[in-house]
Amino acid sequence: MSEIILIAAIAQTNGVIGDRGQLPWSIPEDLKRFRQLTLHHTVIMGRKTWEFDLRKRPLPDRRNIIISSQSLQAEGVEFVRSLSQALECTDAKRFIIGGASIYRQALDVVDRMELTIVEGNYSGDVFFCEWRDRLSDFELLNLDQQDGYRFETYQRLVPT
Ligand SMILES: NC(=O)c1ccc[n+]([C@@H]2O[C@H](COP(=O)([O-])OP(=O)(O)OC[C@H]3O[C@@H](n4cnc5c(N)ncnc54)[C@H](OP(=O)(O)O)[C@@H]3O)[C@@H](O)[C@H]2O)c1
């Protein structure tokens, strides 16, 4: 079965996900979990996440697909022109790894969301989309409370 999974870390208070092209926090356990979940699967990202967060270095041992309207090329990654083109690949697990513009476009099509909700106040310049309005489309499958953050897994409800 093929699955589309959104994975994001979000500030609980204001929905911040980025600050000047970087994560506003440092949570090694979150990065470890990100790696464990995405390893050997496909990661799909926007051009800015590729350029500023990844500094144009592909995530190793994963298929890296980057969405851009520009004609770009780089070793070890694939460029596509839209999210729907990125999702044409039929790999078993396709992770939507950001940033904000790609999350917004993907919310309608994701089967699962792996969210890290970060407690405390963080300032930033990029925000996650209004996902809480859409939570009736999903059920909370798992909640794992940690010190200062928690992992939440949501599965899209199948209409009956
Ligand atoms: N907290 C988290 O979990 C997390 C995860 C990832 C990223 N982030 C943060 O998110 C921020 C970046 O997000 P962002 O929204 O500014 O940028 P982004 O989504 O990473 O990239 C935006 C770019 O993607 C391309 N794009 C998006 N939609 C497209 C479409 N439909 N067709 C063609 N190209 C399209 C465009 O590239 P072109 O301009 O080249 O056409 C656009 O400028 C950073 O601060 C980063 O740290 C946070």
Image (cartoon, grey):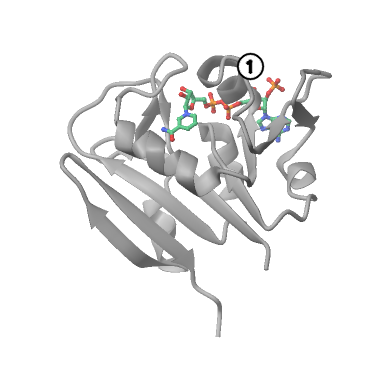
Does residue 129 appear in this view? no
Mark 1 Cα-neighbour bin, 10 Å: few <14, some 14–19, many ≥20: some
Q: Residue at 39% across / 48% down in the picture? A: 115
Quarter of the image for residue 64 reads top right
Towards the viewer: 130 or 11: 11
Classify mark 1 as within 8 Å of ligand 1 or not, answering yes or no: no
In the rendered view, tell whether residue 55 sits above or below residue 6.
Answer: above
Q: Which residue is drawn at 35% across and 66% down?
A: 140
Q: Quadrant of ligand 1?
A: top right
Which residue extends farthest bottom? 160
Q: In this view, does 97 lie to the left or right of 28?
A: right
- Relative to residue 46, is residue 86 depicted above or below? below
Q: Which residue type carries mark 1?
A: Lys
Residue nearest the viewer, comparing 9 with 130: 9
Give x and y (percent) for residue 95.
Answer: 58, 46
Identify which residue is drawn at 29% across, 31% down: 27
Question: Residue visible at 73% across and 26% down?
Answer: 68
Residue 87 lies, with reference to residue 10, above or below; the image says below
Pick the residue in front: 123 or 144: 144
Residue 45, position as x, y percentages in the image: 62, 33
Left or right, 26 with reference to 48: left
In the rendered view of the protein, which quadrant contains the C terminus? bottom right
Looking at the rendered image, the quarter that the N terminus falls into is bottom right
Residue 158 falls in image quadrant: bottom right
Q: Is mark 1 on a helix, strand or loop?
A: loop
Residue 103 placement: quadrant: top right
- Give percent across and percent down for residue 116: 34, 44
Residue to which mark 1 is pinned: 56
